[in-house]
Amino acid sequence: MFQPTDGGYTNGYHHDAAAAGISGGHRVRRGRSRVRRCGGVGSGSNSDGGARVSQWQQQQHEDEEEREKPAPPCTDFDTAYFNSYAHVGIHEEMIKDRVRTDSYRNAIFQHQNFIAGKVVVDVGCGTGILSIFCAQAGARRVYAVDASDIAVQANEIVKANNLSDKVIVLHGRVEDVEIDEEVDVIVSEWMGYMLLYESMLGSVITARDRWLKPGGLILPSHATLYMAPVTHPDRYSESVDFWRNVYGIDMSAIMPLAKQCAFEEPSVETITVENVLTWPQVVKHVDCYTVTIQELESITARFKFESMMRSPFHGFAFWFDVEFTGPAVFLLNNGMPPSFVEPSNSNMTEGNQRKKRPNPNEALVLSTAPEDPPTHWQQTLVYFYDPLDVEQDQVIEGSLTLSQSKENARFMNIHLEYSSGGRSFVKESVMR
C-alpha cells in the first residue's frame, strides 16, 4: 500500500500520477515458487561477596524460562506453508542451485572437526541432503527435522543410503518434536527471499535455545542483508512503456494499471552490477548465536547513498550473504561470552564490504550479490511506479523498516521513506 503523508511526501509516484489512486500490498513475483519450510517461534560477576549473578548466568536463566514456555500453536498459515514444501519441485530447485548446495557441503566438511563424532540437528531438513552431508562428515547422530510431508521421502532417502543408524528423521515442528539430548551442531538452510522472508530463522533460534550446547556450532553462523538504489530502464520499458504504442494503437490509458501490476509487489529477479547506482549498505547483520525472535519482529535501518552516475532511479535492490564460521560462544574467565561487533549502516565500499565480518580471512561466504554467481534467491527489487532522475553524487537518504505481518508472521511488511533532490516519498508493500 502506498500512503501519502504530511510534509510533502508522495505515495511512491514521482509526479501527479498519484491521482490514479493505485494502492495495494506487494506479492512476490515467483517465476519459480519458493515458499520456505518449517518452523516458527520457537549484571556483572560476583565480587566482594555480593550475591549478584553474572549477566551471562542471568541470560542463561532467561533462556531456560523461554524453553519452558509452551510451543506456539500451529496456525492454518503454518499448515499451508508446510504443505507447500511437500512438493518435490521446490527441493529440486534448491538442490540444483550449485552455489547454495556446494557452499553448504563445503562448510560442513570445512568444519568436520566440530562435526565428527558429534550430534547434529538439521532444522528444516527437506530431502535430508544436508543431514547426509553431516553423516558423511562423521557425525555420530543427526536429527533431521521437518514439518512438511517431504520428511517421509527424506526417511526413505536415508534408508536407501544405509544411514538409518546415524540419521533420525523427525516429522514435526521444531517446537513440538523431542530430542532427548543436547546437540553440538545446528545446520539449517533457513534463508528466504530478502533473507528474512518466511521467518524460518525463528525455527533455528528455537532449536538453538532448546538443544544447542554452550560453545556449539551453528551453520551458517552469521547473515547480512544489504540494500542499494538501482536503475533498470529495460524492466520499466518492458512493463510500462510497451503500452504507449501497441500495433500502432495508443494504449497508454492502461499504463497506471500496468504500473500497479508490475511494481505494486516486490519482484524476485536477477540484476547485474550495472543496475546498481551506489555501493550497498547494511540493513541488518544477524549473529545466529545471539539473535532473538523478538529482535526479528521489526527491523529499522537508516540509509544515505550518493549516486555514482546520472541515471533514472527505479527503486531499491536487496540481497544477502551468509557466513559459515566456528562457534561464537566460548565462555571467558569472567563467565561472559565474547561480544561481536555489528556492521554499521555507514556507506560501504568494495574494499571494506566483507571486512566488516568476523574472521574474514577464514570465513566461507555464500553470497547472493549481483556481482557473484547467480543463485535461486536472485535479488529482491522494490520498484517505484515512476522513476526519479538523479545526478552523479546526488544524495538518496531515508529509512527502511521490515516487520512481520500481523496477518501472517511469515509475510514481511516493507516500509520505505526516502528523499532525494528536495523531494520526499513513502512506499509500503507486503512480501507474501
Image (cartoon, helix red, strand yellow):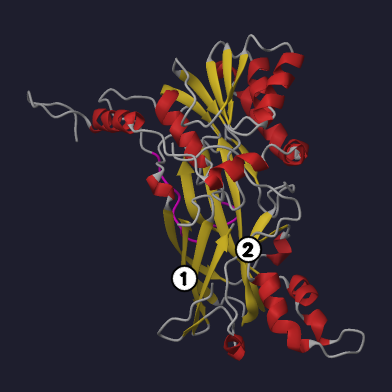
Please determine whether, in this image, residue 187 is positioned above or below residue 263.
above
- Which picture quadrant has residue 314? bottom right
Image x and y of residue 406, in percent: 45, 57
Q: Nearer the viewer, residue 205 or 84?
A: 84
Q: Residue furthest right?
A: 247
Image x and y of residue 74, in percent: 49, 39
Residue sitting at 73 percent across and 20 percent down?
156
Question: Mark 2 touching mark 1, by CB under 8 A?
Answer: no
* Magenta segment, prevailing SS (helix, strand or loop): loop
How crowded pointer 1 is (Cα within 10 Å; few <14, some 14-19, many 20+) is rated as some
Q: Which residues are magenta?
A: 340-351
Q: Amino acid at mark 2?
A: Pro
Q: Is residue 309 visible?
A: no
Please determine whether, in this image, residue 41 is positioned above or below residue 169.
below
Residue sitting at 80 percent across and 83 percent down?
243
Image quadrant for the C terminus?
A: bottom right
Residue position marked by numbered label 1 in the rendering: 398
Q: Please tell me the numbered disc located at residue 378.
A: none
**SS under mark 1:** strand
Residue position marked by numbered label 2 in the rendering: 266
Image quadrant for the N terminus?
A: bottom right
Residue sitting at 7 percent across and 23 percent down?
49
Image x and y of residue 262, in percent: 70, 71
